[in-house]
Image (cartoon, grey):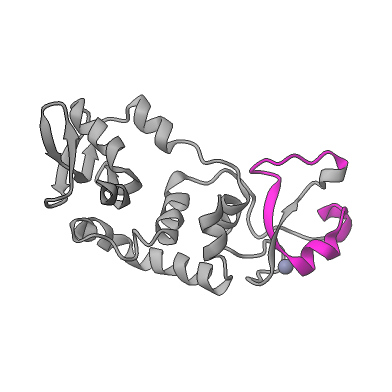
Amino acid sequence: MQFKFKFKFKFKFKFKFKFSLTWYKAFHFEYYGRGEVLEYYPPPAVCSTGSGEHPLPAVLRVPQYTADVQDLCSRVACTRRNVMVRDGFCCQYCGSRRDLTIDHVHPASKGGKETWDNLVTACMRCNQKKSDRSLAQLGWKLKRKPKEPTPFEIGIVAGIATSDILRPPPEWEAYIAPYRERLETYRQAAVEAGLLNLIDDD
Ligand SMILES: [Zn+2]
């Protein structure tokens, strides 16, 4: 059944919203007894197993930080999209939210790497002005020291991009409620910067 694939699942860890992932991963956690299902989607949202049809988990609590959970949640890929998400869609030199690009703090031409601590969001103007000079040469400072973001920060925006979190299924409502304000802040920033399409990209 094609429509099953549009369902997403909410991962809950230590009573905090943590992550969303596909329903089959959620089912995996339940099937192997590694998570407690708090909510199911109503029929006809079911998956077929060898022993018949099974309701799809909507919200799952995982009591232990298992290797599987760690794999899913501990690292965030260092992509253009994720760097902007981490920086709140905000130029790390002047604070602008327009014409955003990615800048190598230590210039790529001088061996600067594509790593979390060397990539920042920069507006076109700052990026051009900076060119291949160092911050010390320019007397510039970064708004925040760049580092690897948490999966929570990235997961929220990924959810916004697919509308899962801003228009959640009713089964998610109670669990998302405490994060509404924060989600809205991220959404506003993404809309202002015209970056929702970019978020969908990679
Ligand atoms: Zn700027």
Q: Quadrant of residue 97?
A: bottom right
Residue 177 versus residue 44 in the image, above or below: below
- Does any portion of residue 137 appear in the rendered image? yes
Residue shown at the point (89%, 55%) measured from the top left:
137
Residue 57, x across and y down, in percent: 19, 43
Which range of residues does the magenta coloring cover? 110-138
Residue 28 versus residue 37 in the image, above or below: above
Front residue (pair 73, 16): 73
Horizontal relation, residue 179 to residue 152: left or right = left
Residue 138, x across and y down, in percent: 86, 60
Specify the quarter for ligand 1: bottom right
Residue shown at the point (22%, 28%) measured from the top left:
34
- Does any portion of residue 63 appear in the rendered image? no
Residue 90, x across and y down, in percent: 61, 65
Horizontal relation, residue 195 to residue 70: left or right = right
Q: Quadrant of residue 56?
A: top left
Residue shown at the point (85%, 65%) measured from the top left:
129
Residue 179, x across and y down, in percent: 33, 61
Horizontal relation, residue 127 to residue 20: left or right = right
Q: Please tell me whether residue 126 belongs to the stretch shown in magenta.
A: yes
Q: Please tell me whether residue 76 belongs to the stretch shown in magenta.
A: no
How many numbered discs sit on the rendered protein? 0
